[in-house]
Amino acid sequence: MNQRQVVDGGKSSDGGSRPGKNGDGAERHEAIYQSISDAIIEHRLKPGARLREDALAEVFGISRTGIRKILQRLALEQLVTLTPRRGASVTRPTADEAKDVFDARQMVECGLMPEVARRITAEDAQSLREMAAREREALRAGEQSAAIKLSAAFHGRLARISGNATLAAFVERLCSRSSLILAVYGNAGHLGCESHDHDDLVGYLESGNGERAQAFMSRHLKAIEASLSIRAEEDEAPDLFEIFSG
Amino acid sequence: MNQRQVVDGGKSSDGGSRPGKNGDGAERHEAIYQSISDAIIEHRLKPGARLREDALAEVFGISRTGIRKILQRLALEQLVTLTPRRGASVTRPTADEAKDVFDARQMVECGLMPEVARRITAEDAQSLREMAAREREALRAGEQSAAIKLSAAFHGRLARISGNATLAAFVERLCSRSSLILAVYGNAGHLGCESHDHDDLVGYLESGNGERAQAFMSRHLKAIEASLSIRAEEDEAPDLFEIFSG
DNA sequence: GCAACGGAAAGCGTATACAATAAGCGGCAT
DNA sequence: ATGCCGCTTATTGTATACGCTTTCCGTTGC
């Protein structure tokens, strides 16, 4: 079998703090999870794409058991949809879900800004600026995939600074789902986040102006949402009667 | 003890298990999940309790495969903790996690109140009052388990009325975790929610007073949190030096 | 020519078998 | 007597085997 194992080579060359028998299964699973998750978030796997267990098992060189575990995790995070007896596919968010996700982001991310402004350190700000810079750079280089991931990572990191791990994890999940929403309802060539928004936001936060950061974040999210072309496409089960009786 | 199958009584009771053939495995799994989840939320399984796969598999009459799936789901909802090679146990929330959860509830549940007040219908209010009544009744009858579950269900139902499924699901998870927190840090005999709070809340909502409902919810949650005796117990790794050097 | 039925194939759901590992325990050496 | 080491056991991690459902295609009847 020419199983080209995708994960093994690249990712496990991390810090290397523990060399030797580190071919541990847990880390391997985590890496595979990240691989698939990244592919979805970066739109290399598009909504609706089917994820056959056998194929994934062969690609990553583990058995279906491990793949199923990973798919279930992705399903609980609503990145993939598991339909009984039909297998897994990349989730295609509905218009309602899109609205819910952005409303939730509006509430949580904005609500977090004051606390973030209170807690942010110089290193945090520096790190965020670097992420924003890399994102802008990717955007200019036409690497949409990288830009999308970096944007989600920026929002996630921001939330982490609040110190509330529970809310931060929630924001990260919302950002992942937002990436899916962009894939379905976004207009090509117009990425969600404007170029300078993230930089400006860091500025407000660093100066301790939580109120202003909150308002800015609110506008920022509204702008992203407004840039979507959300139409409740009923392609799934088109109402033939209505179509032909008109 | 014999194999007393809890969920779906007689199926493959005898050793020669004939697999499959049981029409709806999915519902069965869901029921088992609910069983375990309820047991945790109702404190029949206390934080720290170990959940051995074999034992659960035997109790519910399915194989370890299905149990593992369920345990993973519970782990993602942070009701159980999965430690590698040590198996599953009911999560024992730390003091930090408890604070995070209540801060999150403060933000999300309060933030949802205005929308809930806008959307609530007469039937919703009626349903909520019934739940509150059942909760009070359970509390008076000394059935703490039932009361705890009903309280969580009340808050969850409330969030559902907002129409935002994503935030509602998040609130439900926070309530489940709150139940665990109560088990660890709560004072016996003093349940989280005061008797009349839920009734009063429904009253404010039904009269469309979102602002007031929001403020009331905030006080309500603060009261619950204040009733906890959260001390950062460092029992896990006690500082022996400090203890014995004094 | 079209629709419907039947068989074959593909892919998921579940159980079981096997391997690996950490905890418990008794023996042995010092 | 005590501390250490290897064995045993209990329990999880992973893979594989098998059955079931769905789907697709070829055939047959009208």
Image (tube, coloured by chain):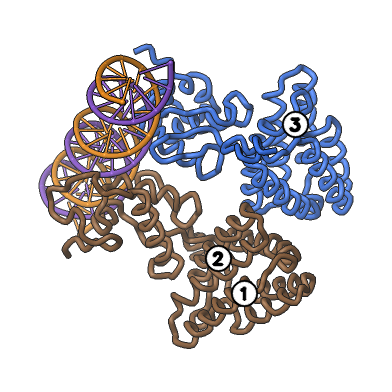
Chain colours: A blue, B brown, C purple, D orange
Instruction: Using the image, determine if residue B204 lies above or below residue A117.
Output: below
Q: Are marks 2 and 3 in contact (CB under 8 Å)?
A: no
Instruction: Using the image, determine if residue B51 lies above or below residue B202.
Output: above
Which chain letter matches label 1?
B
Instruction: Residue B231: name its quadrant.
Output: bottom right
Q: Could you confirm whether marks 1 and 3 are on the same chain?
A: no
Look at mark 1 in the image and give the residue it sits on: B224
Instruction: Using the image, determine if residue B8 lies above or below residue A31.
Output: below
View extreme (bottom): residue: B140
Q: Residue at x 46, y 36 (%)?
A: A71
Specify whether A40 is left or right of A84: right
Q: Tell me if residue B228 can be seen.
A: no
Q: Are marks 1 and 2 in contact (CB under 8 Å)?
A: yes
Q: Position of residue A2 (x, y in %)?
A: 38, 11
Q: Residue at x 50, y 53 (%)?
A: B77
Look at mark 2 in the image and give the residue it sits on: B178
Q: Nearer the viewer, residue A221 or A237?
A: A237
> The residue under label 3 is which amino acid type?
Met
The circle drawn on residue A131 is 3
> Where the N terminus of chain B falls, by quadrant?
bottom left
Q: How many marks?
A: 3
How many C-alpha atoms fall within 10 Å of the one at disc 3: few (<14), some, or many (≥20)? Answer: many
Q: Nearer the viewer, residue A229 or D27?
A: D27
